[in-house]
Image: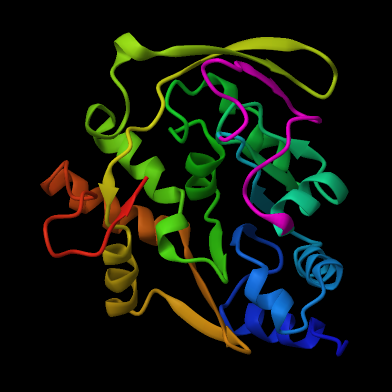
Amino acid sequence: MAAKAPAIREMLTRLRIPRDGVLLVHSSFARFSREGYDLDEVLETLVDWMSQGTLLMPSMSWRFVKKDRPFFDEKETPSNTGVLAETFRKRFSTRRSLHPTHSVSGRGPLAERILATHHRCVTPCSAESPFGRLVEAGGHVLMFGEGFDCCTLLHHCEEIAAPDVYCKPESETETYTCRDAAGQEVQVRLRRHLFLPRDYWQFQDQLAARGELAVHACDSSMCRGFEAARLAKIALDALKANPRAMLAVPGQRYRLM
């Protein structure tokens, strides 16, 4: 198998990912694997690139932690965000945010600050979540072979601007027990997302139109990079003008989520 680390480093350079910044990676590894990319080599290259910064990956567990299974363990609960993110969580991360459905794993100097307050959030991705902290920290997002419909930062914008449109009502708030790596347990209250036809691709187009989206192909796998604050501003402006801006109208591309 040919070494692919140079291709990953070229991608990170072309997408203007600062090595001493904060980077959140959404990933889909299947196509990369078919094209000869080795999982360990990719992860080691990403970790090395961000060795002076903070590297984050979603470690969401909403498939495993539900109303009838209301328990989350920072170390033991598996994630359902793909093999790259799950391997990062197990092998490289030093901290995972304490949240039953939308946790994030990370390593680096800002990981503790970014991940430490997630359990305070009543909606999954609100201001004290890693997604809100990512914007505060001036971080970047890398969509590594993943489509814009998986950009969780847009859930954050929904929750900031119009939680009653996109989340279940307060009367349906659920309570979960979350255990941290030291064995301490906290109760987390949660208003889950509503299952709705969302159009997130519109914001990719708007980023691109402003010259704020960088795109690079690793073989045939597309990677996209952008500043979290730039996307958040576009989405929040749209939601301020129309609280239902995330929802697809007839004829638009959409995904139920």
- In the rendered image, residue 126, in percent from the top left (x then y), is placed at 43, 33
Q: Where does the N terminus fall, quadrant-wise?
A: bottom right
14 within the magenta span: no
Residue 36 in the image: above or below residue 132: below
Residue 161, located in which quarter of the rendered image?
Answer: top left
217 vs 147, left or right, is right
At a point 56% along the width and 31% down the height, the residue shown is 101
Residue 174 in the image: above or below residue 238: above
- In the rendered image, residue 89, in percent from the top left (x then y), is placed at 77, 46
Q: Where does the C terminus fall, quadrant-wise?
A: top left
- In the rendered image, residue 53, in percent from the top left (x then y), is placed at 73, 58
Using the rendered image of the protein, determine whether residue 108 is visible from the camera's viewpoint. no
82 within the magenta span: yes
Task: State the colouring used for the structure image.
Answer: rainbow
Using the rendered image of the protein, determine whether residue 254 is visible from the camera's viewpoint. yes
Region rendered in magenta: 63-83
Given residues 33 and 104, the one toward you in this image is 33
At a point 80% along the width and 53% down the height, the residue shown is 87
At a point 66% along the width and 54% down the height, the residue shown is 82
